[in-house]
Image (cartoon, helix red, strand yellow):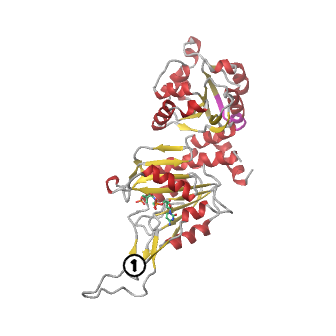
Amino acid sequence: MRAESLVSTDAQQQILAGRTLLLIVGGGVAAYKSLDLVRRLRERGARVRTVLTAAAARFVTPLSFASLSGERVFDDLFSLTDEQEMGHIRLSREADLVVVAPATAHLLARMASGQADDLATTLLLATDKRVLVAPAMNVRMWLHPATRRNIAQLRDDGVLFVGPEEGEMACGEFGPGRMSEPLAIVAAIAAALPGAGRQSLAGRHVVVTSGPTREPIDPARYLSNRSSGKQGHAIAAAAARAGARVTLVSGPVEIDDPPGVETRHVETALQMLAAVEAALPADLFIGAAAVADWRAEPAPDKIKKRPGGAPPSLVLSENPDILARVARRESARPTLVVGFAAETRDMIANAEEKLARKGCDLIVANDVSAAAGVFGGDANEVHLVGPDGVESWPRLDKSDVAARLVARLAERLSQAECAR
Ligand code: PMT
């Protein structure tokens, strides 16, 4: 285990100690792993209240959860005693976070359609807390269009996901659908808890690029683009709020350096590459800069306009691809390398092509056509394009895109290290 993950386990302990979690256990064979989840959470000082669906109680007994959690286990919406002792609204409101593990295809469908026909779904509808789900199901059920629709709906509703993982399943098939291991769920819970934002990247080093680059033509002129740095700077600020040590490599922008971030100012793509390489090693690299693809050989003196003369021709050469260089490093490659894709058409197909060509782990695609107003604007609508598919977020303020992205990457970082 790497030193960083030890730091992150300490951080998890700090975040989880004294927190109350409401664990809803769905009816799948993975329910047995939730017993270990309860044990791990208790070891880290969390209080766990468990609710079993009727189907879950056929896989694991309420008594096992009661013994491990040291708490009464709830499994019946209409129990008058429960209602008198602990109304279901209170049960969901007193939790810091609601965790659904395993979340079966059926339970996800009921959540997505807002049903409230048993204690588990009633609590999920009544809660005002964040909900984190750990899906577990057969691979074909996971890939079925109905499940994809339900997941998209739940993500839109703000529900957080951890897993599922790919692997051999209880039914003998292979593919995505296996519930994440308890330690990966613990890490996701720690990242999702309110107030955990400050801690979810504690002990990590994050390098972010932002803004445009300027490629000089002569001492007076340059080639550049419309990037304002708002998106990249917001990401650097969110990572710093999440407890990371952040190095921001910024092209020339009009906005202030984010607080709590070490900012290195550069102008050209070559300077940006050198500053990024000097900042490594890092746990996470996020390339949000709009790096110029080409540079000119700058003339030593201002190119003169000659009356009646032909306009000068520019000979361009290709700049190094900073993102691809970082992603393809043989030593000190960051655990996660994330790029952006600025597109004006065929956004997803182009982002998928960039993901493969540059060798990064995730591409955040955004529409930079004039109509979308992303360059220089305050809002962005992004699509997360990864090897497992595409996740589209609604149009959000750039700071919310940044906060969500950082939370998601913190989760993935912990999972990647748990999987080692
Ligand atoms: O700065 P704002 O006004 O807030 O606007 C935000 C943004 C639109 C600039 C940002 O959200 C964004 O999309 N940044 C990436 C812009 C870009 O250069 O995209 P691209 O599709 O050309 O490049 C793909 C990826 O490769 C990017 O991560 C880019 O940083 C990287 N790249 C590209 C060329 C190069 N020579 N080196 C690189 O590292």
Q: Is residue 96 in sight in this rendering?
A: no
Q: Is residue 46 magenta?
A: yes
Task: Say what secondary structure mark 1 lies in.
Answer: loop
Q: In the depicted view, which residue is nearer to us: 231 or 334?
A: 334
Q: Which residues are magenta?
A: 40-48
Q: Position of residue 184 (x, y in %)?
A: 66, 41
Residue at image location 67% in from the left, 25% down from the top: 29
Within 10 Å of the Cα at label 1, are there few (<14), some (14-19), or many (20+) other Cα atoms?
Answer: few
Q: In the depicted view, which residue is nearer to us: 113 or 116?
A: 113
| Left or right placement of residue 153 versus residue 38 in this view | left
Q: Which residue is mark 1?
A: 314
Q: Is residue 382 in sight in this rendering?
A: yes
Check the image and report above or below for 202 versus 77: below
Q: Position of residue 102 (x, y in %)?
A: 62, 29
Residue at image location 63% in from the left, 42% down from the top: 15
Q: Residue furthest right?
A: 1
| Left or right placement of residue 85 versus residue 30 in this view | left
> Which residue type carries mark 1?
Leu
Q: Residue furthest top?
A: 80
Q: Position of residue 317 (x, y in %)?
A: 47, 75
Residue 222's image quarter? bottom left
Total label count?
1
Check the image and report above or below for 172 versus 305: above
Residue 308's image quarter? bottom left
